[in-house]
């Protein structure tokens, strides 16, 4: 399974961006999907997750500004980011749990990361 993220870029404070991440390969079922970010000089942190049935979880710092969604038929997760702040700057990584169907475990995958830069 491969995850391909896209949609990052440079945006001014208060602007918006939409990230997408598509899973490809031999897929049986993608369960939890999520977005993480790594600000410059800091550790990777959770941004938001979404379960297969649409249950969401957000970091306090992005609540009411970011919205995570997914399309199960396309194995794709999205992150709509509004009212962006300079502290949202970082490399954004998508993450997914894949259940292969033939064993009672699931495997975790990371995308390659996409840069988001918010400037004033």
Image (cartoon, grey):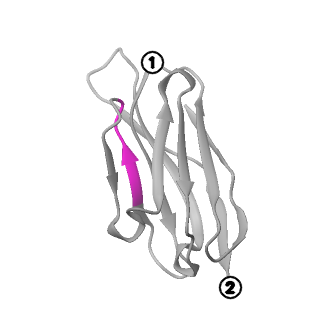
As drawn, the label of residue 120 is 2
Figure check: 61 above or below 22? below
Residue shown at 44% from the left, 40% from the top = 96
Q: Is residue 64 magenta?
A: no
Horizontal side of 80 relative to 53 (left or right) equals right
Principal secondary structure, stretch drawn in magenta: strand
Q: Quadrant of the N terminus?
A: top right
Horizontal side of 52 relative to 25 (left or right) equals left
Marks 2 and 1: which is nearer the front?
A: 2
Figure check: 119 above or below 70? below
For numbered disc 1, what is the local secondary structure? loop
Horizontal side of 73 relative to 15 (left or right) equals left
Q: Position of residue 10 (x, y in %)?
A: 73, 69
Q: Residue furthest left?
A: 104
Residue range in magenta is 47-52
For numbered disc 2, what is the local secondary structure? loop
Q: How far apart in space, not on screen, are marks 2 and 1 (Cα)?
A: 43 Å
Mark 1, Cα crowd under 10 Å, few <14 / some 14-19 / many 20+, is few
Figure check: 115 above or below 29? below
Residue shown at 52% from the left, 79% from the top = 87
Residue shown at 55% from the left, 20% from the top = 26
Q: Position of residue 18 (x, y in %)?
A: 62, 52
Query: Circle 1 sits on which residue?
Result: 28
Q: Quadrant of the C terminus?
A: bottom right
Residue 45 sits in which quadrant? bottom left
């Amino acid at each position: 399974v491969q995850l391909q993220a896209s949609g990052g870029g440079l945006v001014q404070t208060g602007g918006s961006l939409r990230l997408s991440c598509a899973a490809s390969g031999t897929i049986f079922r993608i369960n939890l999907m999520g977005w993480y970010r790594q600000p410059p000089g800091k550790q990777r942190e959770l941004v938001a997750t979404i379960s297969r049935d649409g249950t969401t979880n957000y970091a306090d710092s992005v609540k009411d500004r970011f919205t995570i969604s997914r399309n199960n038929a396309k194995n794709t997760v999205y992150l709509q980011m509004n009212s962006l702040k300079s502290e949202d700057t970082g490399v954004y990584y998508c993450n997914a749990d894949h259940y292969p169907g033939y064993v009672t475990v699931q495997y975790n995958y990371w995308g390659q990361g996409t840069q988001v830069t918010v400037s004033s």
